Image: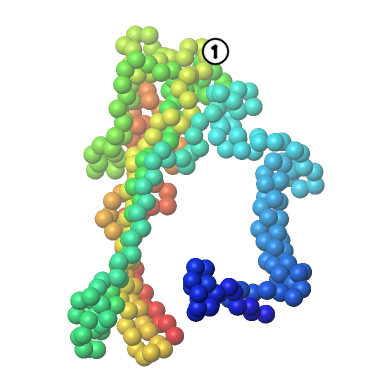
């Protein structure tokens, strides 16, 4: 039932606020009964699945799902490791995951042009002109990101170690990486210039050093980064009112609207990462990053009713 709260049109102070309405229940249990379905839905469709997911994340099951073992947070730590050596020494295999970027800037914009009936400009134009200048909308998604990680390796590591951790030591010089010019003949782009063989004592010291036999290089996993990425997609749409109920929309999409290539040089995109291998494609970019392409165009016509 509804009750009138304190106050009326006469008097002052609190009573001058006017009429207030509040809901009261004759049965004290009725509010809880009304809220109960919401609580049940929240428990069943949110907390229960979330709890199940968290519990499963700390278990390891066999191939057939018949047995499971509680492993605490090992499933999470293995996201950041190199499987070749993790079980022996976590510190050697620790590093960023292959898809990690240090910086990611994302901009999403939607702009409806202020032209046409009911808009700021040309708001009183005829229906014929409104079909031409009204109903335009622009939308854009731009992503500007730092490069994906990769791990350097050296050429003559097999005689020095046999555990699959083919990394050099840090040296004393600088190592330059960057996107160079396209070699039209080989269709490759230089990302870095390989240094002389680091295992040859006759070569002068540089940015990398030989770990020597029986030792593993001290450069951590995935501490170098490939070329930065720039992705920008543009959509232009035009709405056409047909009747009060029916509308049509023409959409034109431009993927990678600036036709900017995103070059592949990372751990999960086949980096040619040997820092002292001479010849071949070592240190070179040979393709685009997976999931990207040069400019692509498409259009569509949609009817809403």
Visible residue check, residue 197: no
How far from the left and from the top, in percent, is residue 205? 33, 12
User: Residue drawn at (44%, 20%), measured in percent from left and top?
Assistant: 168
Q: Which residue is mark 1?
A: 214
**In the image, is 17 to the left or to the right of 124?**
right
**Residue 286 screen position, x and y as percent:** 35, 41
Considering the image in quadrants, where does the N terminus appear?
Answer: bottom right
Q: Secondary structure at mark 1?
A: loop
**As drawn, 18 above or below 264:** below
Asked whether residue 231 appears in the rendered view, the answer is: yes
Residue at (33, 28) in percent of width and height:
279
Location of residue 226 (image quadrant): top left
Quadrant of the drawing holding the C terminus: bottom left
Q: Is residue 59 left or right of residue 10?
A: right
Q: Position of residue 147 (x, y in %)?
A: 38, 40
The relative height of residue 305 versus residue 226 in the rendered view (above or below) is below
- Towards the viewer: 164 or 110: 110
Question: Which residue lies at the image location 76% right of the left edge and 69% below the top edge?
Answer: 28
List the single residue furthest toward the bottom.
243
Indicate whether 117 appears above or below 54.
below
Q: Would you call the spot at circle 1 few (<14 residues within 10 Å), some (14-19), or many (20 or more)?
A: few
Query: Among all residues in the image, which is located at the extreme front?
Result: 11
Image side of residue 5 versus residue 49, left or right: left
């Amino acid at each position: 039932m509804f009750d009138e709260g304190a106050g009326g049109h006469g008097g002052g102070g609190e009573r001058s606020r006017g009429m207030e309405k509040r809901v009261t229940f004759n049965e004290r249990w009725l509010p809880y009964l009304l809220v109960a379905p919401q609580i049940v839905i929240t428990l069943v469709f949110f907390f229960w699945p979330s709890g199940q997911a968290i519990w499963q994340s700390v278990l390891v099951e066999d191939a057939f799902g018949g047995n499971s073992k509680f492993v605490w947070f090992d499933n999470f730590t293995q996201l950041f490791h190199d499987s070749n050596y993790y079980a022996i020494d976590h510190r050697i295999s620790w590093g960023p995951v292959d898809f990690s970027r240090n910086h990611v800037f994302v901009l999403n914009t939607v702009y409806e042009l202020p032209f046409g009936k009911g808009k700021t400009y040309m708001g009183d134009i005829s229906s014929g002109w409104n079909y031409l200048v009204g109903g335009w909308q622009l939308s854009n998604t731009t992503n500007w990101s730092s490069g994906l990680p990769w791990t350097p390796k050296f050429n003559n590591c097999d005689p020095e170690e046999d555990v699959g951790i083919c990394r050099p030591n840090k040296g004393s010089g600088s190592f330059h990486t960057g996107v160079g010019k396209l070699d039209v003949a080989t269709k490759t782009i230089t990302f870095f210039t390989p240094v002389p063989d680091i295992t040859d004592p006759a070569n002068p010291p540089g940015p990398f050093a030989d770990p020597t036999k029986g030792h593993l290089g001290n450069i951590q996993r995935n501490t170098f980064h490939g070329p930065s990425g720039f992705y920008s997609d543009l959509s232009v749409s035009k709405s056409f009112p047909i009747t009060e109920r029916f509308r049509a929309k023409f959409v034109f999409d431009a993927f990678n609207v600036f036709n900017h290539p995103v070059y592949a040089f990372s751990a999960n995109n086949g980096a040619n990462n040997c820092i002292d291998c001479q010849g071949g494609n070592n240190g070179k970019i040979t393709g685009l990053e997976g999931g990207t392409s040069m400019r692509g165009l498409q259009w569509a016509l949609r009817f809403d009713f």
